[in-house]
């Protein structure tokens, strides 16, 4: 059924490392017209790129998905429109000017750190056409009140959507999906693929990737895993901080004066003295030794496709629920996915037939080595996983659900 045209503006950000690499590999792009820079950046297929523009069109939407922190591109837009943004707040100022120009019915605040409550409320004041502000959250946050400027919040994590509803917010769950157009942009699979990869990040903060570090620490010792992770090299004093923390973990008794060892170490880690001395937590040195450069956008998809087996591991806050993008990115390009077992994984894929699940670092290593040694089994799982993703987890399906949500709340 055709609906009246709806104008949607999705406000997002890209990883700084991706933007830097993109402009460095395209000399002179930063001087080109905004439309050329926008098209070139969307073609990298980083994150959601312009996936909603392409898939919501058939539902009667006109979309624009500006990247707030793409400085060269955003300043070019400002120049073309005779707008001089203040240097101290150029990102929000340009997005606000773009919203005034575009006159959207719907603001999709994909980057909740950027689009806080104050900024969402200001957009409502400055852009009378706005009828609905949708937020998105799939990562830890400091204060739930930062979402108070949004009418409804979407999350790929069911338990997080439920948490928002328990705090009085309107919230909906929508799973991630795979962008099929990626397949037409990738080169042929290499004749010498990586045997086993992890492509992602390691953020050593509470609710992020503490368990991921423990998993990778075991895998680098027991498998030929290659890590494509954007991980800055630690300074000497940070290495010393890691050594001291590891020593505390190894030699302290489980309880000290009534306090658990883990609680004591957490307090020491967060003390002002520790922050001054070591500045940032450091991952296990054995992980650094196995790292190559991080991969983003099409480079990430190519790395996945050129892997015989690739590892997925959810953020700590996901708890026992499968939800992240890698589930669909890896299977979508036809790679055998080894992923952490979750209570709802079977709702998305058939474990051991379309993906392979593990419940411990030891099991992950065992299954990775088995898959690497059994080509036929690995290929059959990879092919079945890709069929399932292309059938059930495409953005065509998610766009229909997203449209239903918008029409319900607008």
Image (cartoon, rainbow, N blue to C red):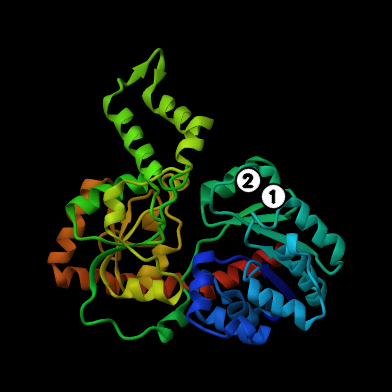
Which residue lies at the image location 35% right of the left edge and 43% below the top edge?
239
Q: Is residue 43 above or below residue 405?
A: below
Q: Is residue 55 visible?
A: yes
Q: Is residue 396 above or below residue 248?
A: below
Q: Is residue 203 above or below residue 69?
A: above
The total of numbered circles placed on residues is 2
Q: Residue furthest front?
A: 236
Position in image of residue 278 (x %, y %): 45, 39
Report which residue position mark 1 lands on: 147
Which residue lies at the image location 40% right of the left edge and 12% below the top edge?
257
118 lies left or right of 74: right
* Local SS, label 2: helix
Label 2–label 1 contact, CB within 8 A: yes
Distance from disc 2 to disc 1, alpha carbons, whole Å, reads: 9 Å
Q: Is residue 41 above or below residue 16?
A: below
Position in image of residue 141 (x %, y %): 59, 46
295 lies left or right of 53: left
Report which residue position mark 2 lands on: 164
Which residue lies at the image location 43% right of the left edge and 43% below the top edge?
281
* Local SS, label 1: helix
Give the class, few, some or many, for how many residues have Cα within 10 Å of label 2's Cα (few <14, many ≥20): many
């Amino acid at each position: 059924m055709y609906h009246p045209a709806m104008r949607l503006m999705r406000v997002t950000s890209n990883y700084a490392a991706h933007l830097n690499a993109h402009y460095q590999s395209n000399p002179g792009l930063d001087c080109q017209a905004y439309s050329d820079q926008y098209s070139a950046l969307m073609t990298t297929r980083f994150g959601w790129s312009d996936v909603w523009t392409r898939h919501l069109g058939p539902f009667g939407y006109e979309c624009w998905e500006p990247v707030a922190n793409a400085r060269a591109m955003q300043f070019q837009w400002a120049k073309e429109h005779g707008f001089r943004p203040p240097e101290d707040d150029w990102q929000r100022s340009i997005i606000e000017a773009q919203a005034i120009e575009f006159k959207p019915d719907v603001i999709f605040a994909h980057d909740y750190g950027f689009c806080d409550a104050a900024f969402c409320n200001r957009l409502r004041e400055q852009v009378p056409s706005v009828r609905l502000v949708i937020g998105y959250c799939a990562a830890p946050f400091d204060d739930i009140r930062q979402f108070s400027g949004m009418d409804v919040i979407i999350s790929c994590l069911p338990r997080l959507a439920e948490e928002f509803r328990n705090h009085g917010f309107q919230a909906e769950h929508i799973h991630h999906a795979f962008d099929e157009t990626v397949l037409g942009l990738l080169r042929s699979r290499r004749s010498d693929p990586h045997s086993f990869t992890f492509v992602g990040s390691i953020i050593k903060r509470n609710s992020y990737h503490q368990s991921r570090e423990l998993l990778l620490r075991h895998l680098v010792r027991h498998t030929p895993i290659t890590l494509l992770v954007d991980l800055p090299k630690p300074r000497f004093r940070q290495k010393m901080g890691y050594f001291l923390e590891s020593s505390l973990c190894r030699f302290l008794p489980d309880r000290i004066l009534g306090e658990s060892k883990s609680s004591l170490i957490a307090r020491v880690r967060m003390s002002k003295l520790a922050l001054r001395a070591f500045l940032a937590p450091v991952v296990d040195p054995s992980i650094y030794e196995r790292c190559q450069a991080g991969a983003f956008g099409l480079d990430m998809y190519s790395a996945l496709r050129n892997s015989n087996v690739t590892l997925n591991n959810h953020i700590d806050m996901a708890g026992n629920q499968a939800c992240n993008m890698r589930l669909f990115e890896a299977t979508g390009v036809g790679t055998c996915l080894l992923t952490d077992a979750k209570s709802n994984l079977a709702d998305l894929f058939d474990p051991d037939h379309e993906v392979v699940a593990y419940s411990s670092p030891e099991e992950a290593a065992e299954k990775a080595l088995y898959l690497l040694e059994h080509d036929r089994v690995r290929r059959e799982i990879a092919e079945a996983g890709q069929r399932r993703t292309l059938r059930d987890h495409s953005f065509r399906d998610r766009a229909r659900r997203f449209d239903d949500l918008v029409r319900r709340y607008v």
